[in-house]
Amino acid sequence: MAYKNKVYVSMDADNDLRYYYLMKAWKQSDYTSFNFYDAHDINNIYDKSEASIKAGLQERFRKTKVFVLLVGEHTKYMYKYVRWEIEQAIKRKIPCIVVNLNGKRSEDQNRCPALMRDNLAVHISFNAKILQYALENWPEFDEKCRKEGKTGAYYYKENVYEKLGMY
């Protein structure tokens, strides 16, 4: 089943942009069921001032239903935009999926930005199958957790990965 809502992807664009492009390639491939509607396709930002960029990003957030944070080696040090994007997702109560680029299937205390470690989010490894699963299942579980007042890091058990053919 293809995920039909807008997804906002945040990352360290200097070091991890290739992973974002790989996600876009998964979406284009005829060999995978991976799909997402990229919030970054909504509007192009041409003015390079910080205020204009953030105004354009605000517009993207208004259309966003899921926030995906790609966590690489340097992500926790990104303050200008990544931290601001995390703050926007939290403020707007957007379901958050944290994707560990190092393959870790649970919260990576060493790489995950502190602001996201305390936030309600599911932490997964970087793979099309588990990301598609999270896009399809996490938003509903996130809503349930919020109603129950739950916060913090969640992760999928190994049997979910095995069911998806990931050993």
Image (cartoon, rainbow, N blue to C red):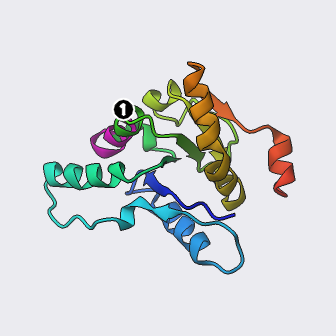
Our reading of the magenta stretch's main secondary structure is: helix
Residue 71: give x, y in percent of width and height: 52, 45
Q: Quadrant of residue 36?
A: bottom right
Q: Which residue is mark 1?
A: 91
Residue 101: give x, y in percent of width and height: 59, 50
Magenta-drawn segment:
79-86
Q: Is residue 127 above or below residue 119?
A: below
Residue 82: give x, y in percent of width and height: 36, 44
Per the image, is 82 magenta? yes
Direction from residue 13 to residue 53 in the image, left or right: left
Direction from residue 61 to residue 150 in the image, left or right: right
Kind of residue at badge 1: Lys
Residue 65 in view of the camera: yes
Residue 120: give x, y in percent of width and height: 54, 29
Direction from residue 137 to residue 52 in the image, left or right: left
- Which residue is depicted at the point 80% across and 49% down? 161
- Which residue is depicted at the point 26% across and 67% down? 44
* SS label for mark 1: helix
